[in-house]
Image (cartoon, rainbow, N blue to C red):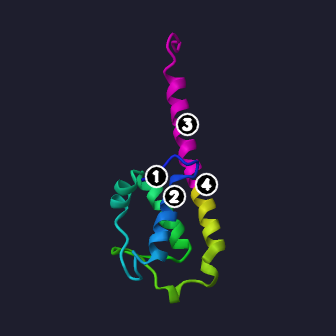
Amino acid sequence: MVKNTGQPGYLQIADDLRAQIRGGSLAPGAPLPSTAQLAQRYDASLSVVKMAVGILRNEGLVIGQQGKGVFVSDPDQRPAGGGHAAGEVAELRAAVQDLSVRLSRVEEQLATSTTRRPGRSSR
């Protein structure tokens, strides 16, 4: 479950899945649970789970196979250095995506509130 620690939920999920992969409870070749299952397990939205999996993908810890799912990659096939720079880029991209979603919601709320002002009529 995602906790109110000040750290974004997608990073908490990515950290937990990374620990499971490195600890061996998610072995090479093992499928990750579906996005919906992870969202339920962590009590998070689908977009938050997708961002977390995206980080792991950019780090080379998991590989997506079209139409089949996401699987833990073979350690021998992972990029040298653990893909640390790629992980940082992924975190930045995920943060920008999260901010974009939040900004869209705020803009929608503003658009709705300005069109429904009580006491004003359009003449």
Question: Mark 1: which secondary structure?
Answer: loop
- Residue at the spot of label 2: 12
3D distance between C-alphas at marks 4 and 2: 17 Å
Camera-nearest label, 2 or 3 = 2
Q: Which residues are magenta?
A: 97-123
Q: Which mark is residue 2?
A: 1
Pick the front one: 42 or 106? 42
Instruction: Identify the mark nearer the N-term, 2 or 1.
Output: 1
The amino acid pointed to by label 4 is Val
- Residue at the spot of label 3: 106
Mark 1 crowd level (few <14, some 14–19, many ≥20, 10 Å Cα)? some
3D distance between C-alphas at marks 2 and 1: 7 Å
Residue at 33% across / 75% down in the picture?
Answer: 68
At which x and y percent is residue 92? 63, 60
Residue furthest to the front = 23
Instruction: Identify the mark nearer the N-term, 4 or 1.
Output: 1
Residue at 50% across / 76% down in the picture?
Answer: 61
3D distance between C-alphas at marks 4 and 1: 20 Å
Instruction: Identify the mark nearer the N-term, 3 or 1.
Output: 1
Instruction: Identify the mark nearer the N-term, 4 or 2.
Output: 2
- Residue at the spot of label 4: 96
The amino acid pointed to by label 3 is Val
Residue 116: say if magenta.
yes
The amino acid pointed to by label 2 is Gln
Residue at 60% across / 79% down in the picture?
Answer: 82
Question: Mark 3: which secondary structure?
Answer: helix
3D distance between C-alphas at marks 3 and 4: 15 Å
Residue furthest to the top = 119
